[in-house]
């Protein structure tokens, strides 16, 4: 089950999440279309109960945005997680492009500290990689799917393009840029700074 945290009213987010849950999970005691989730505690509990028999993956993208509008969601998730324990087959995947905010979830005093079983740092897809995932589309449609469409013909991005792509996706710390491009970005950063 996939949910993107957006800058929209909380009730609308719960309505959308309830609608997706209604399509994917069985909740015999409750019609989620008529009675959508009232808050995150309600949502996590209903999903955890629905996942007692069958595994369920809840992916929340742009989790840092959710924290801005719902700062207690971390504590709520921790409380439900501790209550349902290992009996529930609910797995929660928190994702986001704000690297520092995502890393803060695992800070020593954060509510979810020590509860993540997997931490991945993914780089943005290059246009060529995006094109490979869209093979079912005609070439003209594939080329119109995003910025940088002139690079879809397989040309490898040069280092300045890679550095700018990293910065554009909120990876602004030197170590983050270095990790994403796979080499020392010092020369490129100096050249860009001179521009």
Image (cartoon, rainbow, N blue to C red):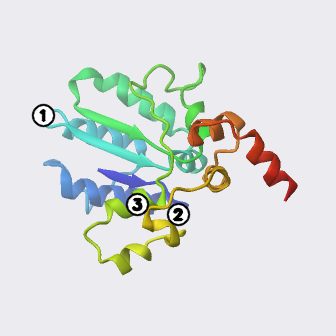
Q: Is residue 11 left or right of residue 1?
A: right
Crowding near the residue tagged with mark 1, few <14, some 14–19, many ≥20 C-alpha atoms within 10 Å: few
> In the rendered image, which quarter contains the C terminus?
bottom right
Tell which tag, 1 or 3, sits nearer the viewer: 3
User: Foreground residue, 179 or 61?
Assistant: 179
| Quadrant in the picture for residue 116 | top left
- Which labelled disc corresponds to residue 130? 3
x 36%, y 45%: residue: 59
Separation (CA) of disc 1 from disc 3: 36 Å
Q: Which residue is mark 2?
A: 8
SS for dot 2: loop
Disc nearer the start of the sequence (1/3)? 1
Crowding near the residue tagged with mark 2, few <14, some 14–19, many ≥20 C-alpha atoms within 10 Å: few
SS for dot 3: helix
Instruction: State if disc 2 and disc 3 touch (CB < 8 Å).
Output: no
Return the x and y of residue 193 as percentages of the image width and height.
84, 52
x 49%, y 71%: residue: 149
Disc nearer the start of the sequence (2/1)? 2
Q: Which residue is mark 1?
A: 53
* In the depicted structure, whether residue 33 falls above or below residue 61: below
């Amino acid at each position: 089950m996939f949910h993107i945290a957006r800058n929209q009213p909380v009730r609308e987010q719960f309505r959308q999440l309830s609608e997706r849950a209604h399509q994917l999970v069985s909740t015999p005691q409750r019609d989620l279309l008529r009675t959508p989730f009232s808050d995150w505690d309600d949502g996590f509990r209903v999903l955890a109960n629905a996942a007692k028999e069958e595994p369920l993956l809840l992916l929340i993208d742009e989790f840092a945005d959710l924290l801005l509008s719902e700062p207690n969601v971390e504590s709520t998730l921790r409380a439900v997680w501790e209550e349902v324990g290992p009996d529930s087959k609910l797995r929660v995947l928190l994702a986001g492009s704000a690297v520092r905010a995502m890393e803060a979830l695992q800070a020593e005093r954060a509510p979810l500290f020590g509860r993540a079983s997997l931490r991945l740092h993914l780089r943005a897809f290059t246009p060529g990689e995006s094109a490979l995932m869209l093979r079912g589309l005609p070439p003209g449609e594939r080329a119109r799917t995003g910025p940088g469409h002139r690079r879809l013909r397989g040309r490898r991005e040069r280092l300045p393009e890679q550095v700018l792509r990293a910065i554009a996706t909120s990876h602004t710390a030197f170590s983050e840029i270095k990790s994403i491009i796979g080499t020392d970005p010092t020369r490129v950063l100096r050249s860009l700074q001179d521009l």
